[in-house]
Amino acid sequence: MTRIVAGRAGGRSLAVPPRGTRPTSDRVREALFSRLEHLDVLDGARVVDLFAGSGALGLEAASRGAADVVLVESAGRAVAVCRRNVSELGLPGVRVAAERVRTWLQRGPTGAGGAPVIDLALVDPPYDLPEEELAGVLADLAGWLDPQGVVVVERSARSPEPPWPTGLARFDDRRYGETALWFAEPVPREGAPAPPGDLAP
């Protein structure tokens, strides 16, 4: 069973698509969100959950205090599951974008007006997504991140490090069995405040 680990909806169960997705385990989500809370990037955050599947990552963020969450998913069955989970949990500020990730990113988040509007990006593509496609997603994403923003990419522990584009740099990585989590931040402009990764112990 997949469930919300903590926060306002902690303990609530989530529906998952019957096939074609790989839900992040409760153990990995608990470790991931503990790290994000340590970085202080969740409270009031603007979050995107790319390749959302069931929406578990984005909904966990909403449960723990994110203010605005977009679940981006293109597979029909997964979109239906995301909508069901959003409706049943009733967390405010969560919506589903039923389209391909790169289409959504290249058009720009709704209401962006050209300004950075993402504080936290949760990127959990299928493990078989080609590295060049992931590179394109990360390049499209980089321009929408707040200077203090964080990107988390979930991959197989056997996959290489994600192909970070100009403007993003890794500051941490963690392994949990077969799962690897990669954390990246915008490369700071000269004179800009240090991003969260530089503050971590």
Image: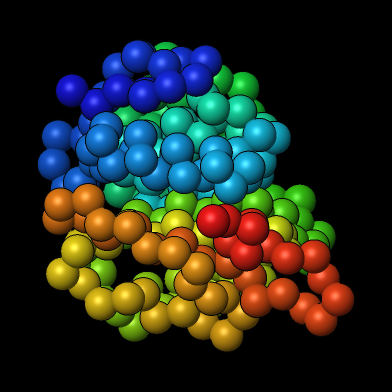
Which residue: 82% across, 71% down? 192
Q: Quadrant of residue 116?
A: bottom right
Left or right: 168 in relation to 45: left
Query: In the image, what residue occupies the spot 46% across and 16% down?
Result: 9
* Residue 94 at x, y percent in the picture: 56, 31
Task: Give me the residue at 13% from left, 41% from top.
Answer: 19
Where is residue 95? Give x, y as percent.
55, 34
The picture quadrant where one finds residue 24 is top left
Q: The N terminus is located in which quarter?
A: top left
Answer with left or right where residue 99 lies relative to residue 18.
right
Is 56 or 95 nearer to us in this picture?
Answer: 56
Count of number-bearing discs: 0
- Rendering coords of residue 155 (x, y %): 27, 62
Give 10 or 22, whichever is nearer the viewer: 10
Quarter of the figure that contains the C terminus = bottom right
Extreme residue in the front direction: 201
Q: In this view, does 36 lie above or below 56?
A: below
Q: Which residue is drawn at 54% across and 27% down?
A: 64
Res 150 visible: no
